Image (cartoon, rainbow, N blue to C red):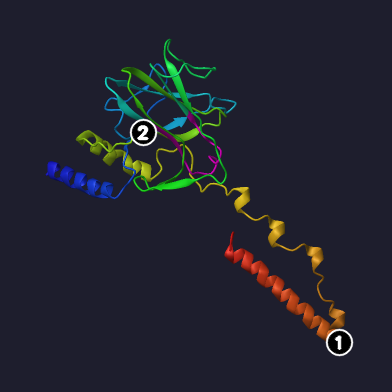
Amino acid sequence: MRNAAICVLVLIFLVAWAGSAWAHVPYLEVGDYTYDNPFQVRKSVEQSIAVYSWLDFDFPDFHSTKIDTYVFTLTEPAEVFLQSIVPACQGYEDFAPWFALVGPGLPEPTEDYPFFVPPGDGVIVTPYEVEHPRPTFYEPFGNQVYFDGPTFNQTISQPGDYLVYYWDPDEMGGDYCAIIGDKEIWQLDDILRALINTPLIRQKKELHITCLPPDADDDTVPPDDDTVPPDDDVTPPDDDNDNDDNDNADDDNDYADDDSAGDDDDNGGDDGGCGS
């Protein structure tokens, strides 16, 4: 019975996964991935995995100087795909962790970086430049929205050990996802891992903050003074004019029409929202 239940769960997972174009094997960070205790890519570096990670804060100043380290070994040429993405949450509008590939045969470093480069190795840094409005995408596998991030995709030929570093030059810190590999390769242990971790991700249990919708960018929300007329532009009618002659009554009616139009404009701004 237990084997049958597992088979049913695997079948349900495969059916759900078949409709997803973003089916990475999900890993959850269980501790800091330091240089001495890195995340080990134990299978092919071409297998698509997503490591849901966290650049922690340094207390008490709440800056983040953490550097997460991932390692893999090449015995033959392989296509190395790397990406950095960030949950689209309030507070992360400017959070943009960079990453770098370090290993043999890569270009020599030309400047200082906040990580260790073994003697004889080279470095390729992929910066994460934030643009506003910041592009997002929906990831159906975890039912979450992410800020799109930079990618590295290059065939690496020289055998050896390679390091991938993720860090935040602005020292903001926060949740991010390290994408390694872009080929959907699934084995039984990968399916079981996804069955355990995917429900947690869909409930946002991997995050270290309460994920509220991000703040709108200034250039997408009209300023208040563009939609609400200043108070001194309109003078309310005087009650003393109620018994004036017909000309004054007509003037009052003209004003009432203008006032109604102003109300319509205000309602339209509230109901239509930005861009209506």
Report the residue marked by disc 1: 247
Identify the residue at image location x=37%, y=20%.
Answer: 162
Disc number lying in front (1 or 2): 1
Q: Disc 1 vs disc 2: Cβ atoms closer than 8 Å?
A: no
Q: CA distance from mark 1 to mark 2?
A: 77 Å
Identify the residue at image location x=63%, y=49%.
Answer: 218
Mark 2 neighbour density, 10 Å: few (under 14) some (14–19) many (20 or more): some
Foreground: 32 or 76?
A: 76
Find residue 234 and report its horizontal and vertical position in percent. 80, 69
Is residue 56 toward the left or the right of residue 264 in the image? Answer: left
Find residue 211 and report its horizontal and vertical position in percent. 48, 44
> Quick check: 248 above or below 110?
below
Foreground: 156 or 254?
A: 156
Residue bounds of the magenta highlight? 82-98
Find residue 206 and report its horizontal and vertical position in percent. 40, 38
Residue 83 on the magenta span: yes
Is residue 160 toward the left or the right of residue 253 in the image? Answer: left
Q: Amino acid at mark 1?
A: Asp
Kindly indicate the quadrant of the structure image that contains residue 118.
top left
Kindly indicate the quadrant of the structure image that contains residue 202.
top left
Residue 252 on the magenta span: no
Q: Quadrant of the N terminus?
A: top left
Report the residue marked by disc 2: 28
Q: Amino acid at mark 2?
A: Leu
Q: Quadrant of the C terminus?
A: bottom right
Find residue 63 and report its horizontal and vertical position in percent. 57, 27
